[in-house]
Amino acid sequence: MLYFDHAATSPVRPEVLEAMRPYLTGVFGNPSSHHTAGEAAARALDDARARVAAVLGMRRSDVVFTAGGTEANNLAVKGIVLAALERNRRHLVVSPIEHESILESAEYLRRFHGVSVTMLPVDSAGRIDPEALDDAIRDDTALVSVGHANNEIGTIQDAAALATVTGAAGVPLHLDAVQSAGWLPLRDPGADAVSIAGHKLGAPKGIGALAVRGRVPLEPLLHGGGQERGRRSGTENVAGAVALATALDLAEAERTSVAAVVAAATGRFITGVLASVPQATLTGDPVRRLPATASFTFAGTSGESVLLELERRGVISSSGSACAAGSDEPSHVLLACGIAPDVAQTSVRFTFGREPLVADAPERLAALVAESVRAVSG
């Protein structure tokens, strides 16, 4: 099997499994318990928090461990905006290409708390214009929340430019870095809050984090025992936190070299598909894109049929986001980029992993894509 759906999830790295194993067996205490077993777990949790904070350019106390990226995004959007309502700030800025966890959180705030939501326009490559953001910010804006890099088309936003705009306006910026963590530097963009998820990095599913600077008020969504400095109650997943910290450390240490190698392989694959499939169109920014992401539309075909043909040939990929469970609607990301619904439904996304590929893998994959498209084109 050739697995090219790493944006959906990646396998657990052996080093991560070994790092978390002790906290699933011998060191099993509750980190809130004031005894030897609990204190050992608390030390591991504190170390994991410090390691995550170091990669994100935050303070240890800024990091809140969550059950994944969706919870981290919900906590960022709802938590920051709900806290800002006391200061009569009830305006939220997002874009139409965001992950569903951001868009649905925005819709919740609109419906149940009267929050005004502005959707920033994007161009055909999914890019946000910082000037448009500047125009959208109001005196009552509570938060700007955007994806650092898009999970479907791979377009990378100019986070530093967006942060310059929000910083000048005194408005917090939240970056959904679930896809960009491990591929892009996260210390530099200047965001006030950053979301990550472990299973995109080689940690298990079910662990993530939101790092939010201490000066930004945050209303908790989960109430109870006051864990995570009162921002996310519930007994912490110590093994998961250790796994996330280990995976993030490994990805960050390898990032520059691995990203260059993977970008070169992805580029060869893109060139091969565009040369051999006449109806193929690359979606997203052709240059400012995640090194591992290549997403195409194949006009005149069915994206699902292409996926089935690819799987018959041993290739696993996806039609876009894996997060809209059971949906057969055209991608909201592609529609926002101006792609017609019938063409958007032909989308197929390939996302490479960090592990080395055999030398001719990109060309072999491109040939299999061409075969699969021909098979469904009659």
Image (cartoon, helix red, strand yellow):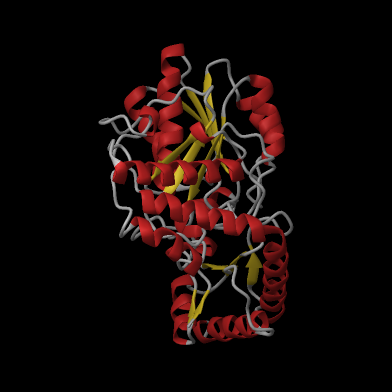
Identity of the residue drawn at 46% across and 68% down:
11
Question: At which x and y percent is residue 362?
Answer: 66, 79
The quarter of the picture where residue 281 lies is bottom right
Q: Nearer the viewer, residue 89 or 135?
A: 89
In the image, residue 224 above or below residue 25:
above
In the rendered image, is residue 317 in sight? yes
Identity of the residue drawn at 60% across and 58% down:
251
Q: Does 162 sit left or right of 37 as displayed?
A: right
In the rendered image, is residue 115 in sight? no
Question: At which x and y percent is residue 375?
Answer: 51, 86
The quarter of the picture where residue 135 lies is top right
Identity of the residue drawn at 58% across and 19% down:
138
The quarter of the picture where residue 158 lies is top right
- Which residue is at the far left? 224
Identity of the residue drawn at 48% across and 56% down:
331
How many numbered marks does the figure carry?
0
Question: At which x and y percent is residue 128?
Answer: 65, 41
- Which residue is at the far front? 36
In the image, residue 279 above or below residue 201:
below
In the image, residue 4 above or below residue 125:
below
Q: Nearer the viewer, residue 138 or 247?
A: 247
Question: At which x and y percent is residue 204?
Answer: 41, 60
Q: Nearer the viewer, residue 231 or 245?
A: 245
In the image, residue 323 above or below residue 378:
above
- Which residue is at the far top? 87
